[in-house]
Image (spheres, grey):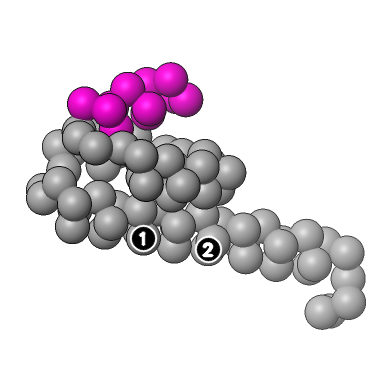
Amino acid sequence: MKQSVIYQDIEGVGREKGRQEEGQSLVLRQLAHRFGKLPSVVHQRIKSLSLQQTEDLSIALLDITDLSALETWLQERL
């Protein structure tokens, strides 16, 4: 069963979803550390990011200085 193409596809999707969720969780923890409690709308938007968008945000966080800049970044990508 482990060798079937369908199993490998399902396993790959699950692995990518796990990476996406872990990336979102890490970004949310970093943002909470920097800015304190995040508005629920910001939290929801981050949870809706794709894996690539989450990775992009993890880099952009180095330059984002306030919640307004974060909200602008999110609006431009969603």
Q: Quadrant of the N terminus?
A: bottom right
* Residue 22 among those drawn in magenta: no
- Tell me where residue 6 appears, x and y as whole percent: 82, 62
Residue with the mark numbered 2: 18
- Residue 10 in the image: state x and y as whole percent: 71, 61
- The amino acid type, in three-letter code, at marker 1 is Leu
Of tags 2 and 1, which is closer to the observer? 1
Badge 1 density bin: few <14, some 14–19, many ≥20, Cα 10 Å: some
Residue 24 place in picture, x, y as percent: 40, 53
Question: Tag 2: Cα neighbours inside 10 Å, few (<14), some, or many (≥20)?
Answer: few
Give the structural element (helix, strand or loop) at label 2. helix
What residue do we see at 31% from left, 37% from top? 64
| Predominant SS of the magenta segment | helix
* Above or below for 40 versus 59: above
In the picture provided, is 68 more to the left or to the right than 44? Answer: left
Q: Based on the displayed image, in which of its 4 quarters is residue 76 positioned?
A: top left
Residue 13's place in the image compared with 35, above or below, is below
**Looking at this view, is 33 or 38 the one in front?**
33
What residue is disc 1 on?
26
Residue stretch rendered in magenta on the structure? 68-78
Which of the two residues, 25 or 57, is positioned nearer the viewer here? Answer: 57
Gap between marks 2 and 1 measured at Cα: 12 Å
- x and y percentages locating residue 13 in the rendered image: 67, 57
Residue 5 visible to the viewer = yes
Picture disc at residue 9: none
| Three-letter code for the amino acid on which mark 2 is drawn | Gly
For label 1, the SS is helix
Residue for point 35% across, 39% down = 63
